[in-house]
Each structure stands twice: as structure tokens, then as C-alpha cells.
Image (cartoon, rainbow, N blue to C red):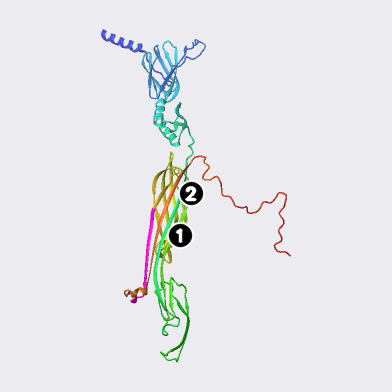
Amino acid sequence: MNSRRVLIFILVICVLGSGRAVYTQTDAVPPAPQAGPSAAPIDPVPIDSAVTDLSLLVGRSTIVEVGSPIARVSLTSADVADALVTSPSQLLVHAKVPGRISMFVWDRAGSIQRYEIAVQRDLARLAADVKQLLPGEPIDVRGNGKYVILSGHVSSKEAAERAVNLAAGFVDARADVVTLLQVQPAPPTPQVLLQVRFAEVSRAALTELGLSLFTSPTGVRNTVGRVTTQQFAAPGFTEQSWTKESSEFGAPVTSAEGKFSFTDFLNFFVFSQRYDLGVMIRAMQQRGLFQSLAEPNLVAESGKEASFLAGGEFPIPVAQGSGGNLAISVIFKEFGIRLNFTPVVQGDQVHLKVRPEVSTLDFGNAVILNGFRIPALTTRRTETELALTDGQTFAIAGLMNNTMNSTLQKIPGIGDIPILGYLFRSKAAQKNQTELVVMITPHILKPGSAGVTSQTPRMAEPYLPPIPPDQAVPTPPPAFPQ
């Protein structure tokens, strides 16, 4: 019995001797004594005039040594930080969210100690991440309560967006990131002047050989005749008249008259008045050289596409629907000399993506659809990418177009006789060769450059002469004088 009493006594002493209690702003406080006639005056509680500042990071904890036995603890906001008594004179303070609160600690003697707790985010780590992941961007990171403030100058809008996304990982919501970042104005984009020369050289060769035989207007023994393949112009007979001894069939001719009509003497013309026979021979060779030039000058910013078209558009009917709902609409197809290019300036070099094209209408291969004659397109195009220095010329050649056309006309039967058949046939051969040459010269236009030329087009002479200041314009005469 005695040992049990001793054990109970020791437990009571331990419980009463610990004296540990934790109070927050919501803890119940013993009611103050009511003032009355017989109430004794209340002495003010002594408060330590020294204020201790505590700086914590969100999610971190610290130990506070009070120095005397703790009787009670009060926090102005338990959402920012909380406190836990771990020993008679020690507190464990845990930071929750950014903010600034006050903490009061009572000891058993009745004195009060005041602590100012400032909870901030780990902005040093955020600043280190921004500096490491966005080098060269002078971004300042600051905290203002629950908000993270980003300020400074960035090189582009994309860099500012990446900095905001990085800071959003250190706050509860993206709206808690306040950005005061200013995007620096981008340097002027260099422009590229592209001088293009289109040279189309066309060579044509034509060979023609043929002949026509004919008699005189009065004929040979009163017989008029002409042999031609109709490929070349042949002589004609006009004003033919003759007389006969009688009206009987086969009666002798007493007189005959007539005239020649020529539209082309071709190359050789021989007529024998003695034998009343003539011959016209066409033997020609033609050589032609044609050159056409187009010199477009285009200016485009670095990285932007520019295009040029010197030609036209031709309509193409397009059938839409079927059966009774068939409708014909018209679209237009472009043709001519076209150039598309995209320059990218890299230092003193121009990375150029160029696509020249030359197309012409080809009516020889046209298609007739519902009464519409739709021409074909003869197109030559090329596409390449290359790097040129400022003022260097690049040439694209070898775009050849060769055509060969041969025509043979003859009189059936007699034109197939060996040797003699050459007198009754005509032949024409035509060969065309076209070569396209494209020469491209890029020029980098620096910001503020004067341009290609300092002179603008001006009129050779004014429309009306200037009027002297001391003279007036005479009144014109009436249009319909009375």
C-alpha cells in the first residue's frame, strides 16, 4: 500500500511540475475578474520591450529558445505559421504560407515576449534557376507576401513567357506571379535586295524544199496545167479565153488568151516562152536568234517570302455537279515569268531559297471541252537553296527546250516514184531551241541605307507651263460664238 501511494504522489508531482501548455489565438482564456466596488485594482502585465524578428521560408521550421518556462503562446494567424512547445523553454515554429504575423509568449512569472515572424518563399532558388535556365536575361526576382514579382528587361516575349512559367512552379497559382518584365525592342531586321535577270535565248532553224510546175496561160498544144502540193503558193490563171473552129467536141483551137497571177515567186522562177512551161522552186534555210529579258528587282525582309510575276491569267472552265445540276464555273490560271524567294541574312551571307519559273501558253496541245478551247502550259521551273555573299551572282542555266517539226507533202502515186517523185513532193523541217538563263544577285540593305538609287523618276517636262505671279490667265474664247 505504501509503495502505491508513493508512486501516485510522484506522478502528481510530475504532472504539476511540467506546467507545459500551448495556447493559440483561439484557445480559451480564463475570464477576467469583473470590476466592482470591492474589486482590487489589476496590475498591468509586464511586456518585454525587445522584439525578436524571425525569418522563415515556406515549409521550413526553426527552434526558438525562450529562456524561461513557457506558460502560454499566442499567434495572430495560425494559417501563416504555427508553434509547438517541445520543452519547458523551447518552441518549434513551422512556416506554412508567405506572410507576416506576431507571436506572444508568456512565461510563468507573467512577463510576455514578442516575436515578429516573416514567412517568405525560397526566392534565392528561383533566382538561381532563372539565371541558369535563362542566361543573359537580367531578371530580378522579388517577393511581396504571397506574390512573386518579376522585373527587368528581356530580349523577347518568349523569354518573358518562359520566366513566368518557371516562377509558377514556386507559387500555389499562376495568378500569384506578377510580371513587370519589359521586352526590349528588337533590332531592325536587315532587308535583302534581289536583282534578277531572266534571259531567254531562242534559236530557230527552218528548211523548206519544194517546186511547182505550170504551163503558160495558153497552154501547151492548147492544154493548160499546173502541178503543186499546196504547201507553197503556186501561180494561177486568170482572164482565160479561147476560140474554136466549131462548137464540136475536139474541134481545133484557133486562138487563146490568158494571164498569170502570182502571189509569191518563191526562190527560183523559170518560164520558157518557147515551150510554154515554167517551174517555181522553193529552197530556203532560215536561222533565227531571239532574246528576251526581264529584270525584276525585289526587296524583302530577312526570313520573309517575296514573289514576282510578269505574265497574265487565262480562264479555265470547271464543271461542278452532275446531271441536271451541272454548272460551269471559271477559274484563272497564272502564267508568265514568276520568281519566289526567301532570304535569311546570316552575318555577311544570305541564305537564299529561290524558285524561278517560266511558263507560256501552248495552243498546239490545247483541249476543247464543251466548246471551250483550253490551252496547255509549257513550264520550266527550278528550285534550289544556296548561300551567297553580299553582291555575289548565282546563275541557273541549262533549262533547254528543243522542238523538231517535219512536214512532207506529195502527190499520191507519182510522188512515190524514185528520182522523178522529187518533182511532185515538198518538204519542210523546223527546229526550235530555247534556253533559259536566270542570274540572281542579292544585296544586303543595312538599316538606314539610301536604297538602290537616290533619284526618283521625274517628268521630262511639266504638263502646263507655270504662270508668272504678275500675270493672269487669259479668258478662253467661247466654245460656240454667237
Q: Give the class, few, some or many, for how many residues have Cα within 10 Å of label 2's Cα (few <14, many ≥20).
A: some
Q: Predominant secondary structure in magenta? A: strand
Q: Position of residue 398 (x, y in %)?
A: 38, 53
Towards the viewer: 210 or 8: 210
**Front of the two marks 1 and 2:** 2
Q: Is residue 348 left or right of residue 466?
A: left
Q: Position of residue 276 (x, y in %)?
A: 43, 81
Q: Which residue sits at x=55%, y=44%?
A: 454
Q: Which residue sits at x=53%, y=45%?
A: 453
The answer to the question of whether label 1 and label 2 lie on touching residues, with beta carbons closer than 8 A, is: no
Residue 410 picture quarter: bottom left
Q: Tell me the number on the disc at residue 375.
A: none
Q: Is residue 237 above or below residue 357?
A: below
Query: Which residue is farthest right?
Result: 482
Q: Is residue 410 magenta?
A: yes
Residue named by callout 1: 314
Residue 369 picture quarter: bottom left
Q: Secondary structure at mark 1?
A: strand
Q: Which residue sits at x=41%, y=17%?
A: 73
- Please state the extent of the stretch shown in magenta in the rendering: 398-416
Amino acid type of the residue that numbered disc 2 sits on in the rendered structure? Asn
Q: Which residue sits at x=34%, y=13%?
A: 15
Amino acid type of the residue that numbered disc 1 sits on in the rendered structure? Phe
Q: Position of residue 165 (x, y in %)?
A: 41, 33
Towards the viewer: 84 or 60: 60
Q: Secondary structure at mark 2?
A: strand
Q: Position of residue 230 (x, y in %)?
A: 41, 73
Quarter of the image with the C terminus is bottom right
Residue 135 picture quarter: top left
- Distance, label 1 to label 2, CA atoms, is 25 Å
Q: Tell me the number on the disc at residue 297.
A: 2
